[in-house]
Structure formats: structure tokens, C-alpha cells
Amino acid sequence: MAKAEEKKFEDNLAELEEIVRKLENGDVALEDAISEFQKGMILSESLKKTLADAENTLVKIVQKDGSLEVFDGE
């Protein structure tokens, strides 16, 4: 499996949703549940970082008056 940061946002979100479904069903062994929970927390942090980065990029692109400025990605 690729690291959470290397996968697409949508893939990480789908994996996190699957983990949540497994844990909500409650038919997972305790050791597996702990492992899944840890994996879910890592995915959650990765998703939050991706969203924060996207928000920061958008803030740099769109000025307060709504006009666009050129942004080189750095």
C-alpha cells in the first residue's frame, strides 16, 4: 500500500470511509479494530492536511476583491 500522502485525496477518503464502516459494524476483532483505528487516524490527518493546503492555495489565488492573481505554486 502506498503512503497516505502519495495517494489521491479521493482514494484516502474512500479508504477512511471503509474503515469507519468496518468499525461501526463492530464485528472486527479488537486487535484489528485498533489497527484499523490507527490507520484511520493517519488517513484523517493526511486528509486534513490536504484540505488545509488546498485552502491556503485558494487564499493566495483569490484576493479579497475577488480578482485572480497569478500563482506559481510556491
Image (cartoon, rainbow, N blue to C red):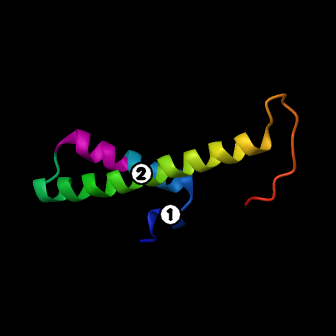
Q: Is residue 54 left or right of residue 25?
A: right
Give the image quarter of residue 64. Answer: top right
Label 2: state its secondary structure. helix
Which residue: 36% across, 56% down? 42
Identify which residue, 31 or 72, lies in the foreground.
72
Identify which residue, 73 or 26, lies in the foreground.
73
Residue 45, numbered circle: 2
What crowding class fits label 1: few (fewer than 14 Cα within 10 Å), some (14-19), or many (20 or more)?
some
Three-letter amino acid code at the position of disc 1: Glu
Give the image quarter of residue 60. Answer: top right
Image x and y of residue 23, in percent: 24, 45
Residue range highlighted in magenta = 18-26
Q: Which residue is mark 1?
A: 5
Three-letter amino acid code at the position of disc 2: Glu
Residue 27 against residue 62 in the figure, above or below: below
Which residue: 87% across, 45% down? 69
Give the image quarter of residue 4. Answer: bottom left
Which residue: 41% across, 54% down? 43
Image x and y of residue 39, in percent: 32, 58
Image x and y of residue 33, in percent: 19, 53
